[in-house]
Image (spheres, rainbow, N blue to C red):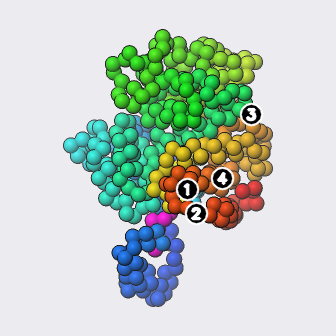
Amino acid sequence: MAISKKEALEYHLGGKIGLRLTKPLLSLRDLCLAYTPGVAEPVREIHRERSALFAYTSKANLVAVVTDGTAILGLGDLGAEASLPVMEGKAVLFKAFGDVDAWPMPLNHCRKDGANTGPTDPERVIEAVAAVAPAYGGINLEDIAAPACFEIEERLDAMLDIPVFHDDQWGTAVITLAGVKNYAIISGRDLAELRVVINGAGAAGIRIAEMLRTSGVSSIVLCDSKGVVRKDRTDLNPRKRMFAVDTSARSVAEAMKGAHIFIGVSVADCIKPDYVRGMADFPAIFAMANPDPEIRPEAVAEAMGRRPYVIATGRSDYPNQVNNVLGFPFLFRGALDARANSINMEMKIAAADALATIARKSVPYSIRLLYNGATLEFGPEYIIPKPFDPRLFVEVPLAVATAAVKTGAAANMNLDIYRRVLQMRNIERLRGTPFEGSDC
């Protein structure tokens, strides 16, 4: 969809988020309740019992969107201040899709030597986030460059008793896994027999490989800008070395010969039609570089001719958009509601399974109407649900909360009641929108 610079700037004038009061302040009594003397009572309760924070403050539904601006949304390292429109946008998506309150937290002085340029200093980011964590029920890390992002997420997750989730690592991985699982069904293959090539060995590529391996995919060839991540290479960092393989293939072109799935989280136009023609019968091409994919869907169509295939991109103007908004709002919704202390691998896989299941069901009329009456039937052009599908708000958080309870990341909860709560909340959330009355 074409958007002009003028239109984009006008839309962002004044910012995209603000404060919403959840209690009235219309009288002297309201003032006394909201602040002194009434505020003293919850303060005493929280001091007496820390868990009262979740009852008497906004913590239970509030997520910090944290960045140092080192890897902004395909734009690169432009700094914390320039990242703010993106962080506000993330907060908008949290609220619109998951009914989660989120607030931007761009961090200056978190680079090496305390500067605002240069590589991330993980210690400074960790210290800053840990210091403000009492106010938040979850931490969403965003646009922090690799490899620092790995250490930051893992250490904060171990340090804090609230969910910590780096969307650039895990968001794309969750949606991709959902698509891969449905591709396996369509192509009649087991996950264990799939041969996968991943081009791009940064945060997203590494985590996609990790999720696929955990889910049963054993043949994974990871490629970076220097070619195949092979065991005989001496320039690999510890993350890449975890996926190094013994193979004669040296380039992504050689690795793709006979592969079932290509997954791209790299750069535009790096895959040639001949590479695709050399893949196995009925392949899947996940070309997810934004805004321009590794290979255009039109080029894939021309290369494949009448041969069946699946194409997915990160764009909304092609079928099978791998969009992180299918993941993070609903992952946090379930984690916050379960009061989970982490978003573990089982919870992420549960989210992917829920997404895959939704795509196999008939699509509500309101969603087909939104997409100009598109058929949207499970098959090569529809293996991933659409972000506006109202069932996401119920099924994904429920799956996440169920996995949290099962794995001990959250205390036991009545999941039948939780489903009904989500359904009622969804009805209220959709009231007055084009999706009111949809199957949710």
Screen quadrant of the N terminus: top right
**Could you tell me what secondary structure mostly forms the magenta stretch?**
helix
Give the residue displayed 60% in from the left and 43% down from the top: 352
143, above or below 164, in the image: above
**Hey, what amino acid is under mark 2?**
Met
* Place of residue 436 in the rendered image (x, y in percent of width and height, measured from the top left): 73, 60
Q: Secondary structure at mark 4?
A: helix
For the residues bearing labels 4 and 2, Cβ distance under 8 angstroms? no
Instruction: Judge the density around disc 1: few (<14), some (14-19), many (≥20) Cα neighbours within 10 Å.
Output: many
Q: Is disc 2 surrounded by few (<14), some (14 to 19) or many (20+) residues within 10 Å?
A: some
Pointer 2 and pointer 1: residues touching (CB < 8 Å)? yes
Three-letter amino acid code at disc 4? Glu
For the residues marked 4 and 3, what is the alpha-carbon distance in whole angstroms? Answer: 21 Å
What's under tag 3, amino acid-wise?
Answer: Gly
Judging from the image, what secondary structure is the residue with disc 2 in?
A: loop
Numbered disc in front, either 3 or 2: 2
Tag of residue 413: 2
Which residue has dot 3 on it? 379
Horizontally, residue 185 falls left or right of residue 137, namely right
Which residues make up the magenta segment?
56-61
Q: Is 275 rendered above or below residue 410?
A: above
The residue to which callout 4 is attached is: 395
In the image, 7 versus 367, the foreground residue is: 367
Q: Quadrant of residue 4?
A: top right
Are discs 1 and 4 less than 8 Å apart at CB? no
The reply to whether callout 4 and callout 3 are in contact (CB within 8 Å) is: no
Residue annotated with mark 1: 405
**Does the magenta segment cover residue 57?**
yes
Q: Which badge, 3 or 2, comes first in the chain's sequence? A: 3
Do callouts 1 and 3 mark residues in contact (Cβ within 8 Å)? no
